[in-house]
């Protein structure tokens, strides 16, 4: 065991810290799930890219720094500690990019990744459909081959698409073989949202932000170059990288450590308080530390070449419950102030989404029980 | 940064684990209960001593029998003990007592290291001392000191307990006498933290074991024509246990590292580990019993042996509430002036 950072990692931390201290916007930006806030966030993300902090773990050729997973963790820690804005490009960077690295052709990698890193193309995730949420393989949106046009014609509807109304592109699964077994006939497509036949309708989330969108596709033509990872391979390709969504790359510990520190500040400002409240504060703080330690163990595993697989469901369960605990505890301390619009109330509303998106916690518990514990399916 | 048990730290745990898997089952735990024949338990303990377990934290130069490992090796070793449920004062001897005897130059050290003299330690004033009803050597606090007595130097008063294999007794030590093992808050705090760490690791091992027993059971037990483990309510309950145990484990390993490395956050890390491990093992015990149905509520079936140990250890060496309160104070949230054994000593 060695839980100390190397001089290189410390130097990396120092460099990130200094840059962030000098550049993080002094006043919090409006929510990135509103049109106005999204624009403000993009400005920030472009500045991040200019300084090569937008995708630190990517190869330099695509705008990254070739940072190790450890350095990435360090960066994330500093990022949240500095109170830097949430990333509105995260669905592209954390969910699509790992798939493009793993399954994309060289042409696709060169076409997609640098523009993503620079926040020029903004990617939305188009998995869910009105009739297919948890049962993702039940999607009905389809893609039909058009030999004459040399491409595919997409028709159907996607929904709950995060920031879909503000993004420029969408990645998602479409049924290419209606005859094949549910999981088999799917293909992973990349779709420009300004293509003819695309209609996007934004709608409100629980917190009042207009961050969701429905995306209607009516005979939208995309090229063969927009197929990612092979026709009929969509399920396999998508599942190969869902671990990123559930696991630590979507939710690095920095975010929760930072919230836990804010909770301590709040509790200190309120004075000693009742033992029960103190207990809750401490328990939430402990769990944030535990999440960091778990990820350090996990990163060691990954760095040493072991597969994480279904374990990412443990991350997801833990961080989503932790986020709620942190915010509910804050609400308890705030008392009547808790309902006033601000970072705690907004964080609370968003924390409620954690057990739903990226696969609900019920689905994650099924995965833990069946794949990690070996309990029988039904 | 490397968050993984090093090979030389894992080696002893593996060796002990092999012995424990082969020789220490539920039968041995039952033997530890009052009226049981403990010869078998003592024999396993001596075998483990032969592998070097009792001297894990004893410096190599002490009698040439110590292994001279540090707290990094303690967590995996104690996990193996926890899994087995062997009714022996493992935390008390390996983590706390033996290294103190070595430092004090106690003549009893060799017999403790050989496993021929059973040693127990408690740092909680006035609380019943685990294994004191059958230990040969008993170390208990007197004021600011920890003193070692042979069993005929003290008065022991056996106490019935939920986990009968712990062989609790109240110990009345004479005002004078005994051998001084440690004194002052700082020294006691170091010993205390090792006990807490070892107990947390035992709890992780117990949690894992109860989960394993339960998974095996719910795969086999059929109701409504299917294994009960295929019911989602059962699956989800067990997934939550897995979650709790899997997140406690790194915290315990990290506390071990902190103690060995003299990390400034050692005290807090240690308390954290105990909170998480205690809660995880309690959850495991409760869920395991529930998922076993009435079978889990009998003493004929083995589960209760592990569950009772978990309840005992969750509260021993400071329960979650006490450790959380200590952390609260460290984080600047506590009430001034509150104190308890957890709070004593310096920061490291
Ligand atoms: C904030 C937020 C952002 C999102 N962003 C996106 C996005 O960008 N792109 C996208 O494609 N989707 C997005 N989603 C949608 C999300 O992926 C789905 O909501 C999620 O997969 C659950 O599907 P559902 O909403 O249809 O719920 P349902 O599948 O209808 O589930 C309803 C309830 O039934 C339970 N349930 C369902 N099946 C089972 C089962 N087998 N066992 C036990 N319980 C079950 C669920 O756990 C849930 O509690 C987002 C959702 C939220 C809340």
Image: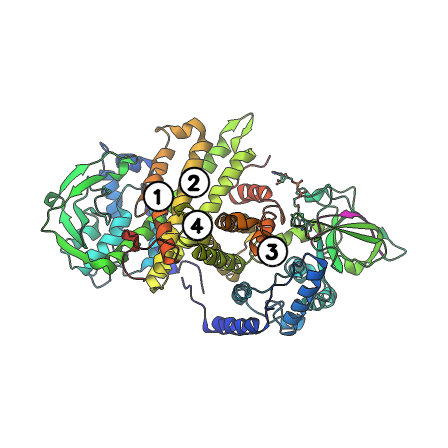
On whether disc 2 and disc 4 are found on a single subunit, the reply is no
Cα distance in 3D space between marks 2 and 3: 29 Å
Q: Name the quadrant containing residue A371.
A: top right
Q: Which mark is residue B29?
A: none
Q: Taking B101 as reference, is A3 left or right?
A: right
- The part of the chain drawn in magenta is A151-162
Cα distance in 3D space between marks 1 and 3: 35 Å
Q: Residue furthest front?
A: A336
Q: Which mark is residue A244?
A: 3
Picture coordinates of residue B80, whole percent (x, y): 36, 48
Q: Quadrant of ligand 1?
A: top right
Cα distance in 3D space between marks 2 and 4: 16 Å
Cα distance in 3D space between marks 2 and 1: 11 Å
Chain for numbered disc 2 = B
Picture coordinates of residue A62, whole percent (x, y): 67, 70
Of tags 2 and 3, which is closer to the observer? 2
Residue labelled with disc 2: B283
Chain for numbered disc 3 = A
């Amino acid at each position: 065991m060695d839980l100390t950072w190397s001089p290189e990692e410390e130097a990396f931390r120092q460099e990130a810290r200094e840059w962030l201290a000098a550049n993080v916007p002094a006043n919090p930006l409006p929510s990135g799930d509103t049109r106005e806030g999204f624009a403000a966030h993009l400005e920030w993300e472009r500045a991040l890219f200019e300084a090569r902090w937008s995708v630190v773990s990517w190869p330099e050729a695509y705008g990254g720094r070739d940072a190790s997973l450890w350095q990435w963790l360090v960066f994330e820690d500093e990022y949240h500690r500095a109170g830097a804005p949430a990333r509105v490009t995260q669905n592209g960077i954390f969910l699509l990019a790992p798939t493009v690295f793993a399954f994309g052709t060289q042409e696709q990698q060169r076409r997609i990744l640098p523009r993503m890193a620079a926040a020029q193309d903004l990617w939305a995730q188009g998995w869910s459909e009105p009739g297919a949420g948890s049962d993702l393989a039940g999607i009905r949106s389809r893609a039909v081959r058009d030999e004459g046009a040399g491409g595919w014609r997409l028709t159907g509807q996607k929904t709950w698409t995060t920031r879909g109304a503000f993004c420029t592109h969408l990645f998602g699964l479409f049924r290419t073989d209606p005859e094949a077994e549910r999981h088999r006939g799917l293909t992973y497509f990349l779709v420009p949202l300004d293509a003819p036949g695309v209609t996007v309708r934004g709608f409100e989330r629980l917190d009042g932000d207009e961050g969701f969108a429905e995306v209607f596709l009516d005979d939208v033509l995309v090229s063969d170059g927009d197929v990612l990872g092979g026709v009929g391979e969509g399920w396999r390709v998508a599942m190969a990288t869902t671990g990123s969504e559930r696991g630590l790359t979507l939710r690095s510990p920095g975010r929760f450590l930072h919230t836990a520190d804010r909770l301590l500040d709040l509790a200190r400002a309120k004075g000693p308080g009742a033992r029960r409240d103190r207990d809750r504060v401490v328990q939430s703080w402990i769990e944030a530390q535990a999440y960091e330690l778990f990820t350090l163990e996990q990163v060691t595993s990954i760095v040493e070449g072991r597969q994480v697989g279904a374990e990412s469901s443990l991350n997801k369960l833990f961080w989503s419950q932790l986020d709620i605990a942190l915010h509910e505890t804050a609400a308890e301390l705030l008392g009547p102030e808790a309902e006033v619009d601000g970072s705690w109330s907004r964080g609370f509303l968003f924390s409620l989404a954690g057990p739903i998106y990226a696969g609900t916690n019920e689905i994650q518990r099924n995965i833990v029980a069946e794949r990690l514990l070996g309990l029988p399916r039904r | 940064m490397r968050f993984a048990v090093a090979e030389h730290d894992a080696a002893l745990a593996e060796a002990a684990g092999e012995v424990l898997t082969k020789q220490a089952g539920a039968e041995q735990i039952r033997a530890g209960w009052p009226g049981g024949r403990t010869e078998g338990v003592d024999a396993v303990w001596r075998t483990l001593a032969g592998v070097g377990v009792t001297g894990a934290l004893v410096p190599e130069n002490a009698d040439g029998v110590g292994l001279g490992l540090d707290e990094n090796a303690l967590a995996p070793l104690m996990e193996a003990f926890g899994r087995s449920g062997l009714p022996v004062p493992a935390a008390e001897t390996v983590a706390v007592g033996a290294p103190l005897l070595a430092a004090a130059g106690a003549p009893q050290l060799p017999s403790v290291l050989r496993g021929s003299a059973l040693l127990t330690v408690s740092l909680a004033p006035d609380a019943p001392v685990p294994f004191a009803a059958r230990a040969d050597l008993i170390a208990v606090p007197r004021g600011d000191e920890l003193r070692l007595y042979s069993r005929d130097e003290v008065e022991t008063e056996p106490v019935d307990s939920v986990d009968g294999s712990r062989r609790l007794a109240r110990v009345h030590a004479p005002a004078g006498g005994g051998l001084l093992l440690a004194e002052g808050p700082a020294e006691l705090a170091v010993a205390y933290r090792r006990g807490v760490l070892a107990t947390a690791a035992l709890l992780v091992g117990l949690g894992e074991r109860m989960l394993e027993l339960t998974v095996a059971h719910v795969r086999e037990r059929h109701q409504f024509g299917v294994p009960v483990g295929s019911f989602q309510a059962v699956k989800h309950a067990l997934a939550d246990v897995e979650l709790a145990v899997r997140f406690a484990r790194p915290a315990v390993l990290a506390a071990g590292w902190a103690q060995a490395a003299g990390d400034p956050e050692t005290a807090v890390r240690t308390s954290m580990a105990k909170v998480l491990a205690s809660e995880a093992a309690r959850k495991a015990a409760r869920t395991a019993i529930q998922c076993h149905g009435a079978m889990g509520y009998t003493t004929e079936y083995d589960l209760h042996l592990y569950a009772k140990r978990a309840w005992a250890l969750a509260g021993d060496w400071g329960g979650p509430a006490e450790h959380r309160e200590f952390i609260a104070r460290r984080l600047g949230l506590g009430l001034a002036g509150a104190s308890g054994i957890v709070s004593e000593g310096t920061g490291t």
